[in-house]
């Protein structure tokens, strides 16, 4: 069972900053891309940001200029630096990774368990 381990969620005031971290198992053969999605109560899960193994990034229009996705020095780690947070961005944030578990396996998506981010004064 492949698990993505997320950390960094919590309570932050409007306008504040928070950094999320996600780590995939070190035994993974290859990671094609990693990213963050979020889901607010009663809403669909939506893309926040992604980054490919080559470093190409993609952001939701709503977070451009405020959020930054980056890879860690270890190939299996990704961060999401969030700034100028808004109350409407309160949600569970999920890490996603498109990976090949072994040389022989196909690529597929894996999800973390989610981390709660609450933006409230």
Image (cartoon, rainbow, N blue to C red):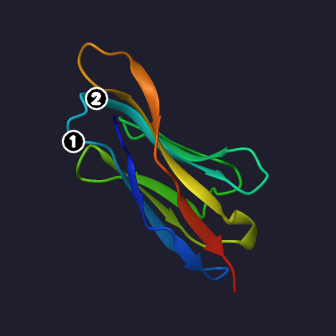
Residue 74 is left or right of residue 7, and the answer is: left
Q: Is residue 27 above or below residue 61?
A: above
Residue 76 is left or right of residue 59, and the answer is: left
State which quadrant residue 6 falls in.
bottom left
Q: Nearer the viewer, mark 1 or mark 2?
A: 1
Q: Which numbered circle lies on residue 106?
A: none
State which quadrant residue 3 falls in.
top left
Q: Is residue 18 above or below residue 14?
A: above
Q: Number of numbered discs present?
A: 2
Seen as rendered, the residue at the extreme top is 104
Residue at 69% x, 86% y is: 121
Query: What residue is pinned by disc 1?
Result: 26
Q: CA distance from mark 1 to mark 2?
A: 10 Å
Residue 121 is left or right of residue 34, and the answer is: right
Position of the N terminus by quadrant: top left
Q: Which numbered circle lies on residue 30?
A: 2
Front position in the image: 105 or 60: 105
Q: Position of residue 25 (x, y in %)?
A: 27, 42
Seen as rendered, the residue at the extreme left is 27
Seen as rendered, the residue at the extreme bottom is 121
Residue at 25% x, 22% y is: 102
Residue at 71% x, 56% y is: 40
Front position in the image: 55 or 35: 35
Front position in the image: 102 or 74: 102
Q: Position of residue 78 (x, y in %)?
A: 38, 51
Indicate the secondary structure of the residue bearing disc 1: loop
Residue at 69% x, 80% y is: 120
Q: Residues within 10 Å of mark 2 (few under 14, many from 20)?
A: some
Q: Residues within 10 Å of mark 1 (few under 14, many from 20)?
A: few
């Amino acid at each position: 069972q492949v698990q993505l381990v997320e950390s960094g969620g919590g309570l932050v005031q409007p306008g504040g900053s928070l950094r999320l971290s996600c780590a995939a198992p070190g035994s993974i053969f290859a990671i094609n891309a990693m990213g963050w999605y979020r889901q607010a109560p009663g809403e669909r899960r939506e893309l926040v940001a992604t980054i490919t193994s080559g470093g190409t990034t993609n952001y939701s229009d709503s977070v451009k200029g405020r959020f930054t996705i980056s890879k860690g020095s270890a190939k299996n780690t990704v961060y999401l630096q969030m700034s100028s947070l808004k109350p409407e961005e309160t949600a569970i944030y999920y890490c996603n990774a498109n990976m090949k578990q072994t040389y022989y396996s196909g690529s597929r998506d894996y999800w973390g368990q989610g981390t709660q981010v609450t933006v409230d004064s």
